[in-house]
Image: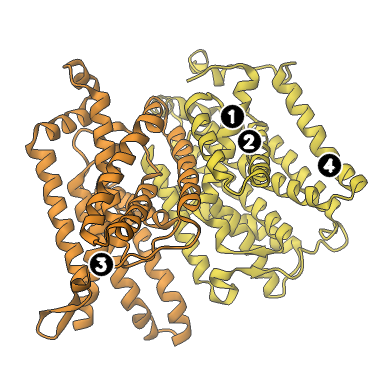
Amino acid sequence: MTASLDPSLAARPWFAFTPRTVFTIALLAILALFPLYSHVTGNTFILTLFTRVLILAIGAVSLNLIMGYGGMVSFGHAAYLGIGGYAVGILAKEGIGSGFVQWPLAVAASALYALVVGALSLRTRGVYFIMITLAFAQMIYYVAIGLDRYGGDDGLTIYKRSDFGGLIDLNNRTVFYYLCFAVLLASIYLISRLVNSRFGLAIRGTRSNERRMRAIGFPTFRYKLAAFVIAGALCGLAGALLANHTSFISPAIMHWTRSGDLIVMVALGGLGSLFGPVIGAVTFLLLQEGLSRVTEYSDLILGPILLLVAIYVHGGIGGLLEGRRRG
Amino acid sequence: MLYFIEQCLNGVQLGMLLFLLAAGLTLVFGIMDLVNLAHGSLYMLGAYFAATFATLTGSFVLALILAILASLIAGMVLEVIAIRPLYRRDHLDHVLGTFGLILFFNELVRLIWGPEGRTLSPPSQMLTAVQILPGVYYPIYRLVIILATLAVAGLLYALVMRTRLGMLIRAGASNREMVGALGINIKLLYTLVFGLGAALAGFAGVMQAPILTVQIGMGENILILAFVVIIIGGIGSIRGAFVAAIIVGLIDTVGRAFLPDMLRLVLSTNAAQTLGPSLSSMSIYMLMAAILVFRPEGLFPAASR
């Protein structure tokens, strides 16, 4: 077994009382109690900010499946946010307001796009893969700019949020926040079930040594493609949430720097750990928000921080909490 | 037909600029195995340097020379401070670190030069158009870009293929441990190569500056095109970068000029007007996808990789 060679494949107890677990539980507790805090203090801005954090965390969690567990560094993940968002926006504009139609379609469209892009890009590896995923995202970005009927470059305002027929009211901030929180927890659960299944072991094995996996009879291409499509579909759902959150969708959401942001969140939180992307998303977005309040030139500080993380921090913040030194 | 020739020349001119960027990227990747997203920032810096030097000296040529020198120095300093520690890390960390550098440089430029764009005018005698074929007039400045870049490409070829430094660069690309073991100062070599790439990017930035506005983020979209160029050409191959740059430049420019008209034959004018530009932007990526399907290593795969 390769398990002895790659620490990430070794069986870990599902619960261990480490600083990391404490931190994760505390983070989740804080996230769960935010609406209460917001209600008591009357600070609605913070709830809006954290709804965005939760949604992007879902995107980061989905990217982590392919990047962290599968070793596929996709530099075009923001494309799914856009596809999911545009699915909601376009349907809303055409008068189809039901979330039961919009959301499944957002997920399906993202999955279909991921299938095509994955089938082409997974023929390559390494830097070629990074760049081809980037280029495909750039292509879909130009498609969105060309959608003249749906706002083109200026974007599309969504006048009515997805309608779930009295089941959930998305116009209620607190309800929407908890919906995002629930989707985030559900996606983490889904990923945890996936990566600990036979499928997940095959994906992680492929990251460690693809040739060996093929030699013992795994059709690695199909496994990788399946993971790629699942990640895309999940991020498409995040896109649908994001469009409902901002009531607006524009090509800017698919700009390649947004894909960069998602990579940063995953890498910052720690690759290939279940809650890492959540920690990364919270840290990155709060850092961005906090720095922009302190100084007008916030990226002057944020940029070097990312560089230092790339150079010195192995395994992101999650790794720091575990005191882990890897790589 | 005359319009077609003009557009083709514009395409070649864009291709030449892409080559300048792609050559630096492909050298840095081929030799140091570094994915450098911040390459577009050096292109932007070059243009800003030139705008400043042009104001100070009042001469475009002097500004060009000074800006290239400044880009070279900026590149070498950047390599020593920020890039060198990244070599040991994997590609993902390169992406993360150099993405941070893009944020840093965009903000730095905003701090130093302010948020408004700058303009840079070429020497006045280059503003006129010249008759290159009977009935075909073409701006001298664009011709100068094409010729100057061709000269630089020739120099680069001579440097890499005919000089001792070039020999070391090629040796470093195929086996860096061996080059280091033979007593070559590999760190200095890397710094020089990175500086060379930065100077090429700065040169591209200066040459393009009079055609477009000098502004924050100007290097980002063209950087993606340069990535496409090195993927099509084959990573690590300068010859591949040259051929691919011209192909990409031609497709982008000619597509942008003629696709709307061609679409008008089958679609309404309005639809063609909006679909045309985005379709021509997409065509490059479709070409890249097609090439990757049939030749995953690019048109001219570098021999050692």
Q: Are marks 4 and 3 on the same chain?
A: no
CA gap between label 1 and label 4 equals 24 Å
Residue B88 falls left or right of residue B168: right
Identity, as a three-letter code, of the amino acid under mark 4: Phe
Q: Chain of mark 4?
A: A
Q: Which residue is mark 1?
A: A270
- Residue at coordinates 37% horizontally, 69% vertically from top-left? B280
Q: Chain of mark 2?
A: A
Q: Which residue is mark 3?
A: B122
Q: Colour of chain B?
A: orange
Position of A162 relative to B22 (above/below): below
Quarter of the image for residue A299 reads top right
Q: Are marks 2 and 1 on the same chain?
A: yes
CA gap between label 2 and label 1 equals 7 Å
Identity, as a three-letter code, of the amino acid under mark 2: Gly
Residue B162's disc number:
none
Q: Colour of chain A?
A: yellow
* Labels 3, 2: front one: 3
How busy is the neighbourhood of tag 2: few (under 14 within 10 Å), some, or many (20 plus)? Answer: many
Q: Which residue is mark 4?
A: A34
Of residue B61 and residue A279, the one placed in the foreground of this image is B61
Q: How many marks?
A: 4
Residue A280's disc number:
2
Q: Are marks 3 and 2 in contact (CB under 8 Å)?
A: no
- Residue at coordinates 17% horizontally, 81% vertically from top-left? B137
How busy is the neighbourhood of tag 3: few (under 14 within 10 Å), some, or many (20 plus)? Answer: some
Of residue A5 and residue B94, the one placed in the foreground of this image is B94
